[in-house]
Image (cartoon, rainbow, N blue to C red):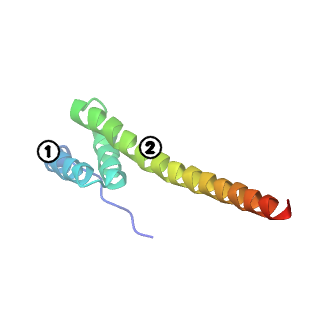
Amino acid sequence: MFELKPLHHEAIPAALEKANRYRLLNEPGAAESIYLDILAIDPDNQEALVNIVLAGLAILTVVAQGQLARIAALACGILLVAAFLAWLSRGKK
């Protein structure tokens, strides 16, 4: 396995620009990785700190949306079973 080269202080502005672009393109995981690289060499970088929180919120939103889709599918399944059972019980009367 190869080792990645560390980010240099001079490269921070370009890295912030790239990370912000990834975040705006709805690629929060890629943006978060770049922000972490920036914070590794400049822990007090305010722009990276604010934007890593925003990227983290975007990741949480994507995860939550996935969970909501599962819950909605489960609810639809339950409703279908209930409707089928009601239909069956009508036929038996």
Q: Residue at x 35, y 35 (%)?
A: 53
- The residue under the point 14% across, 50% down is 14
Tell which circle, 1 or 2, labels the residue nearer the N-terminal end: 1
Q: Amino acid at mark 2?
A: Leu
Q: CA distance from mark 1 to mark 2?
A: 26 Å
Q: Position of residue 3 (x, y in %)?
A: 38, 63
Q: Residues within 10 Å of mark 2 (few under 14, many from 20)?
A: few
Identify the disc placed on residue 13: 1
Residue 42 visible in the displayed image? no
Please give left or right for residue 12 compared with residue 39 in the image: left
Quadrant in which the N terminus is drawn: bottom left
Q: Amino acid at mark 1?
A: Pro
* Residue 64, placed above or below residue 88: above
Image coordinates of residue 36 in percent, x first then y, are 35, 44
- In the rendered image of this protein, does residue 92 appear above or below residue 19? below
Identify the residue shown where x is 48% and y is 45%.
64
Give the residue at the far right of this rendering. 92
Q: Which mark is residue 84?
A: none
Residue 88 image-quadrant placement: bottom right
- Depth check, mark 1 against mark 2: the one in front is 2
Task: Name the element at disc 2.
Answer: helix
Is residue 68 left or right of 35 when viewed as pictured?
right
Out of 32 and 23, give the one closest to the viewer. Answer: 23
Identify which residue, 25 or 82, lies in the foreground.
Answer: 82
Number of numbered discs visible in the structure rendering: 2
Q: Which residue is mark 2?
A: 60
Q: Residue furthest front?
A: 93
Give me the residue at 34% from left, 41% from top.
40
